[in-house]
Each structure stands twice: as C-alpha cells, then as structure tokens.
Image (cartoon, rainbow, N blue to C red):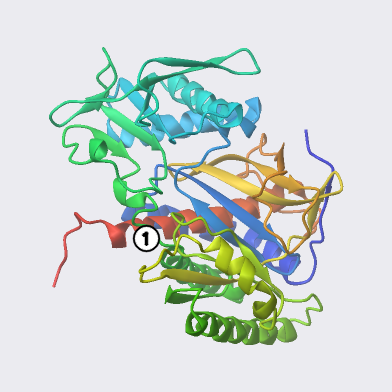
Amino acid sequence: MVPHLVTALNGPINELEQRVLDSMSAIERWFRLEWMEHTPPFYTSVDVRNAGFKLAPVATNLYPDGWHNLTPEMLPLAIQAAMAAIEKICPEARNLLLIPENRSTSSVYLSSLAQLRRIFQMAGLNVRMGSIDPAIKKVTKFDLPNGESVVLEPVVRGKRRIGVKDFDPCTILLNNDLGSGVPGILEEIGEQYLLPPLHAGWTTRRKSKHFKCYEEVAKRMGKLLGVDPWLINPMFDKCPQVKLGDEAGLERVQAQVDLLFTKIRRKYKEYGIKDKPFVVVKADDAAHGMGIVTLRDAKDMNAMRKTLESQMSANREGSPGQDILIQEGVLTSEEVNDAVAEPVVFMMDRYVVGGFYRIHAERGVDENLNAPGSSFVPLAFEHSTHLPQPGSKPGTSVPNRFYMYGVVARLAMLAASYELEATDPDAEVYE
C-alpha cells in the first residue's frame, strides 16, 4: 500500500533523479567496489530529508529501533540481509543474544525488539534477549498489544563471555547505543562476536566525524554523477568545548551560525531558491540532554539563549563544556495525510531492507520530526528500492524516488563505515 504522498520534486531534484537513473549501473558498481574495501555497519537507519531542491541525510543511527514499522512484505529482504550479515561474521552461528536499551520498556520499543527477534529467528538463529539494565534482576515478561510477548533476562558474565542462564551465544547484538558509557560487563569479551563494536556507541561517536566522512563520499558520488555534491550533502560546522552559560561560548556559536548562514544563502542564490534557510544546533554526541534547536537567522540566537542554556544543563559547574554541531537545515517538501513527513531508510549489512515515513502533524517543514507526537507510515518498499523504472519522467515514479532515497542512505552507511574504521581502537596504524 502506498500512502497518500504529496511531494514537490522539482528543479535540481528532478535533474538529480535523472542522473541517478542514468548512472544506476555505475552507482551499483561503485558501491560494490567500496564494500570490497570497507565493512558496512551491521545495521543502520538513516533519516533523509527531501527539500525538492536537495536530498540529504540528517541523522544516521547505528543501533536502529522502529523495526516493527517494517511491513510483512519487507521482511523477506530483512531476513536475507540478516543471513548474509551473519554468514560473513560467523557462518556456524547458532545462538544470538540481543541486548536492548536500558530503561526502555515501552510497548513501542519492545515491539521493535520482537520484530528483530523474528528476523533473526527466520534467518536460522536461536534468539534470547539479555538486559544489562540493573533494574532487570530476574526473568521479566512483557505482553505486547498484538498478543506477542517479550522476555528480558539478566545478562550473566563469565571470564570472557556473556550470556543468560542456560544460553551461551556466539554472537551478541547490541540494540543499546551506550549513550551513558560502556558498562564493564561488555568490556573484554574475547570469545564472542559483539555487534556493532563498542566504539560505534555514543561514548565514542561524534556527529561531526560522521558528517565529515559523509562529505567525502558525497563529493565522490557528486563527481560520479556530474552534479554539485551540495545537492546531497548538508553543510555543517563544529564549535568545540562550548559552555553555553558563558557569554564567550554563546558568541562563538553565534559567529559560526552566521558564517554557515552566509554559505547557505550563497547556494540558495546560485540555485534561485526562494525558501528561507535555517540551521539546526545540537550536541555533537548523543549523551547529553540537548534537543535540536532550529535557528532561522543568526540574530535568533539572542531569543534562543535561554532555550539553549536550559537544554544544555548537562554542562555542570566545572565542566569543560561540550562540542556543538551546527548543521544546515534541510526542509522537507513531503506530506503524508496532511502531515509533514520524512523518510527513514533501514539497512542491514549493505542492503536496503525497508523503511517508513516519520510524520508529525504539529511540526513545520523546517522542524525536527523525531519528537513526541510523531507517527509512522510504511514506505512502499515492498517492490524493492532496487527495481526503479528508468523510462519514467523524473518526479513521477514512486520506485524511482525510493531508489534515490536508498542511494543517499547507503552513502550515509558507507560514511559510517569510514567513521568506524577511523575510530577503531584496535586498528593497525601504519607509518
């Protein structure tokens, strides 16, 4: 079922779609060669924004939830990708331990875990769910609205292995982003496969590092397609060690916001774009409690100071401050059922396996949709993003649009693989 979708695909995006379709063979070969040199993250979801004149990722998640939003038609793709991913890592794998987020016992999140369990069971694995949450001290069952149930068991630690009672897994799959740090129970596991690796968590990850890697792959894809890489790349800047209670820190942020606005306006003028540009300000990691702050002009900083300061309350007295990411905002020109929408693309190993639209009836086209009150509508991926319709006029074909989403999402996934290689503490360093 295709949702009632209203979108404004015009100008540069139509040209980009045509270039992507014309270059499909070259694109797929390029990705194939990249995956010969780089290892994709085990699973990934990417939030994509389509402005009508620009198509770009705005967030890349290496511990994705929301799997229950994939339709039954999408599951065969996910199961095949899970088989391929496990086969590369541990062909003889039999038992998999799934470790969820701490303190996340909402029926929505548990439904996502149940879907993940289903995918790996159908890929041929015995799956149990082990919690490292101190609050889970005994086997705990949660009933879901659809009649299913999820059982969380406390993780037990051996000398160099972890598991749950009477279950010794060869593979550990984290669905916990480690935003509060790496717990000791997960360290120095030398005899099991831990996926994703610990340095994929927010203890180590920085958004600026990811988007720097994405900028690199976007330039290379732009060269392959013969288009301006800005059409698929959100510009950004980083402001390190900011204490927003400090006047000098706020002035530094404001100066960089002003500079980024200048760059964005230059691009808008180049392409004749009449929309009002905006930037988003957010923590460079995800361990702080700062939400996304939207600024439509550098002067807005004065009005937004109290908001920023309250959201940055994690900066305790004596803290050296935190790194701030200032990113070009990407409008969304898409609506589903009269609500503003953005696509979220799900991948496992190197394959696009499905996705959904995140919609929010109370948010505007230049606001963050990943907020309370959002809901989800499945994308029409049941016919696969790898079956575009080359003969269709740009902007008229849903499969073509979804194929384009898949290309941009895979670029973000490739950037994440570059990022993980660069931050791997066990990587060999060659002089």
| Residue in front for this viewpoint, 395 or 241 | 241
| Residue in front for this viewpoint, 359 or 312 | 312
User: What residue is drawn where x is 58% and y is 86%?
Assistant: 259
Query: In which image quadrant can residue 320 be found?
Result: bottom left
Give the left or right position of residue 181, taking residue 310 as reference: left
The answer to whether residue 212 is visible is no
Quarter of the image where the N terminus is located: top right
- Give the percent coordinates (x, y) of residue 128: 38, 19
In the displayed orientation, state which residue is furthest to the front: 317
Give the left or right position of residue 115, taking residue 364 as reference: left
| Residue in front for this viewpoint, 387 or 136 | 136
Query: In which image quadrant can residue 138 be found?
Result: top left
| Residue in front for this viewpoint, 157 or 334 | 157
- Give the percent coordinates (x, y) of residue 27: 53, 59
Give the left or right position of residue 362, taking residue 192 as reference: right
Badge count = 1
Task: Estimate how packed mark 1 is, as few (under 14), some (14 to 19) or many (20 or more) residues with alpha carbons within 10 Å.
Answer: many
User: What residue is drawn where x is 57% and y is 29%?
Assistant: 106
Q: Is residue 364 above or below residue 66?
A: below
Q: Is residue 218 above or below residue 180?
A: below
User: What residue is drawn where x is 43% and y is 52%?
Assistant: 32
User: What residue is drawn where x is 47% and y is 75%?
Assistant: 238
Q: Is residue 207 above or below residue 42?
A: below
The answer to whether residue 317 is visible is yes
Query: Pointer 1: what residue?
Result: 419
- Give the percent coordinates (x, y) of residue 407: 57, 55
Q: Is residue 47 above or below residue 91?
A: below
Quarter of the image where the C terminus is located: bottom left
In the displayed orientation, state which residue is furthest to the right: 338
Give the left or right position of residue 429, taking residue 380 as reference: left
Query: In which image quadrant can residue 383 be found?
Result: top right
